[in-house]
Amino acid sequence: MKFAAIDIGSNSIHLIIVEIYPDGHYIVVDRAKDMVGLARNTLANGFLSDEAIARGLECLKTFQKMCQAHEVTGIEAVATSAVREALNGKHFIQQAKERTGIDIRVVSGKEEAMLIYKGARDHIDWCGRRGLIVDIGGGSVEFIVGDATKADAVMSIPLGVRRLSEQFLETDPPKRSELKRLKHHITAELASLEELVAQHHIDFVIGTSGTLTKLARTAARREGRPFERTHGLWTSLQELKEMARALSGLREAERASFYGVGQKRTDTIVAGAQLMKYALRAVGHDSYVACEYALRDGIVADFISRASQKISGAAPHMRKRSVQTVLNRFNTYGNHPRTVARLSLELFDPLQSFDGNDETTRELLAYAALLHAAGRA
């Protein structure tokens, strides 16, 4: 079946369309993003502006047409901080339903954090470690402490980059006094994060939002570090400090050309760099790793887990899902790889009596057999 997830954030609206297979694995067939800016001048006065509503509805119309073109059979749309806090948020939801047929579900900060964790979990190299996931949105920032199996603690704080920019950074470029007030506000709000981390040991920090992936790319370009993709890029606290200092000294129009920041984040990137800098300090870590999977991917994962009977099987472990995806995409030998896997395991199983039960080796042998000829494609 084909399924679409729509993430209606304070800055951007994201769409991801996936094809889900009977064993629960999926592949992405299309995606889109529009930086609508629903929270622009909304978080301060409590109302979505008419212009923001119009931009949001136009975006949803486009996404609905894309879903029709792909013959999507299920759509789930989730709205976060901007719609959650707006006094006329219900009006926007009603208009979206009437004009596009899309039902929007508003989630709490903790629900949002759990969806982010579900979306990122299977794409992080945990290696037996515990991590802190940080997702900086326009209206709020979500923190999740967990590992590859579960989230132990979640927290949502109203420290989104648009909220901070509109509340504290009034001049262009921002004055030193504005940056000082911003620092005091962020560090005061992050006191609860320090308490959380004191109770839960973490080994590394993961950044999952558009702001943090943009900062990771910008830092890599600035340092001359080559990279093929954003996912997995490491950014040091020292790099964040230097970028925060440089960006805060530039006018908004000048930030667009600062190592690929681009036009769409010039008004919020300063707040984002400052916020992540103080967040890393608060938790006592000197770097973070970028993860390109977040809320929209969490909507897909959550749907698969809830609809397991409908799609004839619950979502398997990420490794199995990845192997199945590669096999489906690049297998040119029909059933031959599966025959090789079956015979390999038939040879392996009797040998376990000599060396004890080794399920990990057995699993890797099966995957190696399935994928041994995929490279020929």
Image (cartoon, helix red, strand yellow):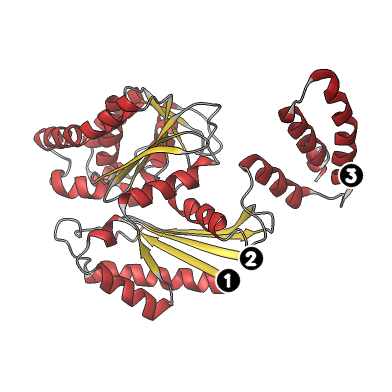
Query: On the picture, is 149 further left or further right than 264?
Result: right
- The residue where tag 1 is placed is 73
Q: Amino acid at mark 2?
A: Met
Label 2 – label 1 distance at C-alpha: 7 Å
Q: Amino acid at mark 3?
A: Thr
Which of the two residues, 118 or 82, is positioned nearer the viewer here?
118
Q: Are marks 2 and 1 in contact (CB under 8 Å)?
A: yes
Q: Are marks 2 and 3 in contact (CB under 8 Å)?
A: no
Find numbered disc 2 in the image and state the secondary structure of the residue it sits on.
Answer: loop
Residue 339, numbered label? 3
Give the mark nearest the N terminus, 1 or 3. Answer: 1
At 61% from the left edge and 42% from the top edge, which residue is drawn? 318
At 17% from the left edge and 41% from the top edge, which residue is drawn? 173
**Res 338 visible:** yes
**Res 263 visible:** no
Find numbered disc 3 in the image and state the secondary structure of the residue it sits on.
Answer: helix
Label 2 – label 3 distance at C-alpha: 27 Å
Residue 1, numbered label? 2
Find numbered disc 1 in the image and state the secondary structure of the residue it sits on.
Answer: loop
